[in-house]
Image (cartoon, rainbow, N blue to C red):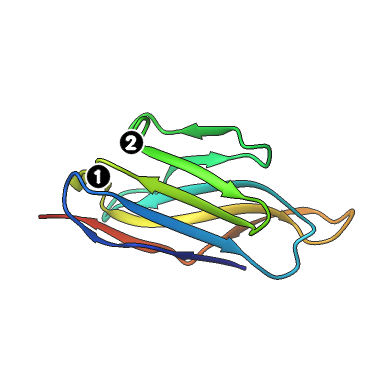
């Protein structure tokens, strides 16, 4: 239901753009968030975007990362600039989706995409 892409190896100070597309039965696509999990650490929230476009970010990525979404494409983006080695992690997208009218809101996770920041 959620397909993330765009990870890879980048040098410190570089940029990378992740995408996450939702597909399948979608009546309403609500909040879309990005999480990350570094080796040996717990998964943490990077930030998210509401359907109307309002965003929130973890302090560690503010002013460096930008989250946006294209509602027509059911896609959320994570633009990462000024990357640091400590940004190395598997990045996951998460979305709250309503698959049918009057149906429940459910949480969906993408498969994760690895971002490695290293020289």
Q: Residue at x 54, y 52 (%)?
A: 76
Secondary structure state at the residue bearing disc 1: loop
Q: CA distance from mark 2 to mark 1?
A: 8 Å
> Which corner quadrant holds the N terminus?
bottom right
Would you identify the image quadrant in which residue 44 lies? top left
Quarter residue 86 falls in: top left
Q: Is the Cβ of the residue at disc 2 closer than 8 Å to that at disc 1?
A: yes
Residue 89 spot, x, y in % from top left: 30, 54
- Measured as percent of width and height from the top left, residue 46 is found at 42, 42
Q: Earlier in the sequence, mark 2 or mark 1?
A: 2
Viewer-nearest residue: 32 or 71 = 71
Q: Mark 2 sits on what residue? A: 64
User: In the rendered view of the protein, which quadrant contains the C terminus?
Assistant: bottom left
Residue shown at 18% from the left, 47% from the top: 85
The residue under the point 41% across, 33% down is 58
- The label on residue 83 is 1
């Amino acid at each position: 239901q959620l397909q993330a892409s765009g990870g890879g190896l980048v040098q410190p100070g570089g940029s990378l753009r992740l995408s996450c597309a939702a597909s399948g039965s979608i009546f309403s696509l609500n909040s879309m968030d990005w999480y990350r999990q570094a080796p040996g650490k717990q998964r943490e929230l990077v930030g998210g975007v509401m359907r109307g476009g309002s965003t929130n970010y973890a302090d560690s990525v503010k002013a460096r990362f930008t989250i946006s979404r294209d509602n027509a494409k059911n896609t959320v983006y994570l633009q990462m600039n000024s990357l640091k080695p400590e940004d190395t992690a598997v990045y996951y997208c998460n979305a709250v989706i309503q698959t049918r009218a009057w149906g429940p809101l459910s949480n969906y996770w993408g498969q994760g995409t690895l971002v490695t920041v290293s020289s």
